[in-house]
Image (cartoon, rainbow, N blue to C red):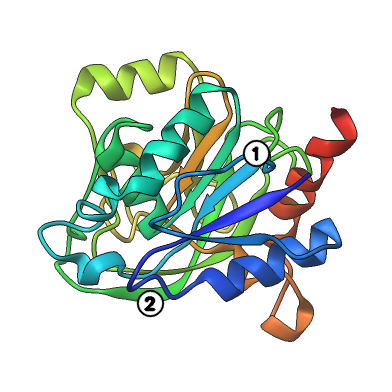
Amino acid sequence: MRAGIILFPGINRERDIAIALEQSLGHKPRLIWHRETELAGIDLAVIPGGFSYGDYLRAGAMAAQSPVMRAVADHAARGGYVLGVCNGFQILTETGLLPGALLRNAGLRFLSMDCHLRVERSDTVFTGHYQRGQVFRAPMAHGDGNYFADAATLDRLEGENLVALRYAEPDGAITARANLNGSARNIAGILSPNLRVLGLMPHPENLVDKLMGGADGKPLFDSLADIGKAA
């Protein structure tokens, strides 16, 4: 599986993603500057976290207009895989590759802490190394992580089983207390209808080694490494 990491001015988690990908894939991902428009030769496009364009206008709004995002959209339309983490998730919603929007956190404060995520389905290329219902720990670091969509969209996501991850208690209970940013229905990550695009707010790439304090996020990248094996 060949991966490329999309870089925008203000993105700051590309090295974290690169380390996680290299650890699982066994080779370095390609770094793709936002003015590039050619994604040939990659299976997975990753949009990492950070503050693209300083979050001016809205988080992800300016990056969504960048030339590379047209290439990412074409890549997705061809059946390529796309992963957006934190600011990457915001960019994916701004481009329309995923529905909904990421609003200011419910408490109007930047959140930098660990959270727990419950895996809602394990039959995707992103979650294959987890078990359905499994809970894992992941750091969060965002000011605009409050997932919002209208009731019809939320019902569609639920009905089509496109909610990948929810904020949960360590024992897996879905509670308001676990929902630190106020996201609708505790949603932390969603999938596209063809299951090839995933957006999530927390940072699994920051827990992929015991030297980081744990490896809870490593199964996500190990799952992606299986893409090439299945091809």
Residue in the image at 21% along x and 55% along y: 62
Residue under label 1: 133
Residue under label 2: 112
Q: Say if 158 sits above or below 199 in the image.
A: above
Earlier in the chain: of badge 2 and badge 1, it is 2
- 148 or 87: nearer the viewer: 87
Between tags 2 and 1, which lies in front? 2
Q: Say if 106 sits above or below 41 in the image.
A: below
Q: Say if 159 sits above or below 169 in the image.
A: above
Q: Quadrant of the N terminus?
A: top right
Question: On the image, which quarter does residue 86 sit in?
Answer: bottom left
Q: Residues within 10 Å of mark 2 (few under 14, many from 20)?
A: few
Image location (x, y in percent) of residue 216: 69, 63
Q: Is residue 214 left or right of residue 204?
A: right
- 78 or 129: nearer the viewer: 78
Residue in the image at 19% along x and 73% along y: 109
Q: Is residue 214 left or right of residue 175?
A: right
Q: Residues within 10 Å of mark 1 (few under 14, many from 20)?
A: some
Q: Is residue 55 left or right of residue 48?
A: left
Image location (x, y in percent) of residue 78: 56, 22
Is the C-beta separation of discs 2 and 1 under 8 Å? no
Q: Residue furthest right?
A: 229
Does residue 93 show up? yes
Q: Amino acid at mark 2?
A: Ser
Q: Quadrant of the C terminus?
A: top right
Image location (x, y in percent) of residue 157: 39, 22
Tag count: 2
Residue in the image at 74% along x and 39% along y: 131
Q: Is residue 150 left or right of residue 13?
A: left
* Secondary element at image label 1: loop
